[in-house]
Image: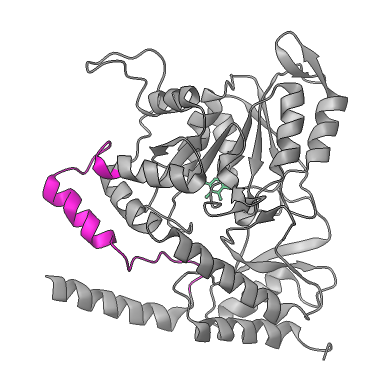
Amino acid sequence: MVALAHTKGTARRRLHDLIMIPLIEPNLSGNEARYLSECIASNFVSSVGPFVTRFERLVADAAGCWNGVATTTGTAALHVALIALGVRPGDLVIMPALTFIGTANAASYCHARPVFLDISAASWTLDPAMLESFLGEECRLEQDGVVHAATRARIGAVVAVHTLGHPADMDQLEAVCARYGLPLLADAAAALGATYRGAPALARGTLASISFNGNKTVTSGGGGAVVGQSAQLLDTVRHLATTARVGAEYEYDRVGFNYRMTNLQAAVGVAHMERLDEFVARKRAIAHRYDEALADLPGITPFPKTSWAESACWYSGFAATLACPRSGAEIIDHLRNGQIGARRFWGRCTFRRPTLTRVVTLPCSTTLTDEQQAQVIDAVRALIGTGNQ
Ligand SMILES: *Cc1c(COP(=O)(O)O)cnc(C)c1O
C-alpha cells in the first residue's frame, strides 16, 4: 500500500512539474501522514480531539496570545470573532478596500454591512488617517456608540487586514479605535510569523483571526483560528463555534455555529505548525530574491515593506504601475503561457489605488526550487526588461 501510494504520488508530481510551476502549493513533507495515521488508529477524527488542543496551543504561542480557538475556516473565524466583539444586525463594519471577499462576507453573515476605507500606499493596509477622518467627520458619538450620521447605523467593529502577510499599523489603529471605544479585529489570515515592532503581530488588536486554507503558509487543509489575550472573549468565540451548547445534553443558549476544527485537520495543522519558522524564513527568502532580481525593471513596484513590521511574505510578486510597458494582465498571460503559475491578487474592484494597474503574484511555495525561481525571473525579465538596459 505504501509503495503504491508513493508511486502514484511520484507520477502525479511528474505530471505536475511538466504542467507548470505552481503559484502556491502545500508542503506536506513533514509529520502530516504520521499524525493523520494516529487520528485513524485512535478513532479520533471529528471535532475536539487531542490534535485540536495541541494545535490551538501551538498557534496561540506563535501568535503571542493567551489562547486560541480553532475553527473550520478563516471566514468562520472572522464571523464568530465579529459576533463576540459585539457586532449586531444593522451595524457597519469598517474594513480596508483591499481585502479578500471573506472579510466582507463575515460582516454580511452578521447581518451587518461592510464599509470600505482606503488603504495606505506604504503598506496596502487600512489607513489610520482614513479611519480617523471617517469616524471624526462622518460619525457621531451617541448613547448607543459610534453612529454613522448619514445612515444612522452603529459602527460595530473595525477590521484591519494584514495584507499579503504584512501587518497593518496597529499602534495607530489601536489608538484611533480606543478613542472611539471600538473593538479592533485583525484579519491576520496569512500573517502567522509576521512581527510588528519586533513582537508577534497577531498579539495586537482586540482579537485576531487566522486562516489555514490550503494556500496559506501554514495549512490544515482547511481551517481557521481566533487568537487573543482575553479569556472572556475567547470563551464566547469557543461557545459560538460549538453550536452555543450548554452542558452535555441538547441545550443551547443562543444561535450558534458548527464551526469547530476536526482532529484530522488539526493533525495536519500541528505538523505544519512545527515548521512555521522554517516556512516563514523560506517565504521571506523567496520574496527577497524576486525583489532584488526585478528591482531595475520599469514600473515594477515590490510588495510593501515598512519600518514598523516584518512581513510573513505569504505571497511574492509585484504591482505593475502605469510606468510598466506591459499591463499586469499581459504579464500574467505571458507567464502562464510559459507554464508559470502567476495570478492576479484579489480583485481590482476592492482596490482603489489608481497608479497600480494590477498586482501580480508569482510562484512562492516553500517547495519552490532555486532553478524554478530563476526560470520565473527570466520569464518576467524577458517580457519587461527591454529598453531599460
Ligand atoms: C484566506 C483569507 C481569508 C479566508 O480564509 P478561509 O480559510 O479561506 O475562509 C480571509 N481573509 C483574508 C485576508 C485571507 O487572505
Q: Residue at x 26, y 48 (%)?
A: 264
208 in relation to 359, above or below: above
Kindly give the residue lying farthest to the bottom in the view shown: 389
Within the magenta stretch, is there residue 251?
no
Q: Quadrant of the C terminus?
A: bottom right
Residue 39 belongs to magenta span: yes
Q: Residue at x 76, y 76 (%)?
A: 326
**Image-based side of 215 in relation to 380, left or right:** left
Q: Position of residue 374 (x, y in %)?
A: 58, 85
Decide if residue 346 is in sight here. no
Please identify the quadrant where the N terminus is shown. Answer: bottom left
The answer to whether residue 72 is left or right of residue 321 is left
Image quadrant where residue 116 sits:
top right
- Which stretch appears magenta? 22-51
Judge left or right: residue 268 versus residue 361.
Answer: left
Give x and y (percent) for residue 42. 13, 46
Q: Quadrant of residue 321?
A: bottom right
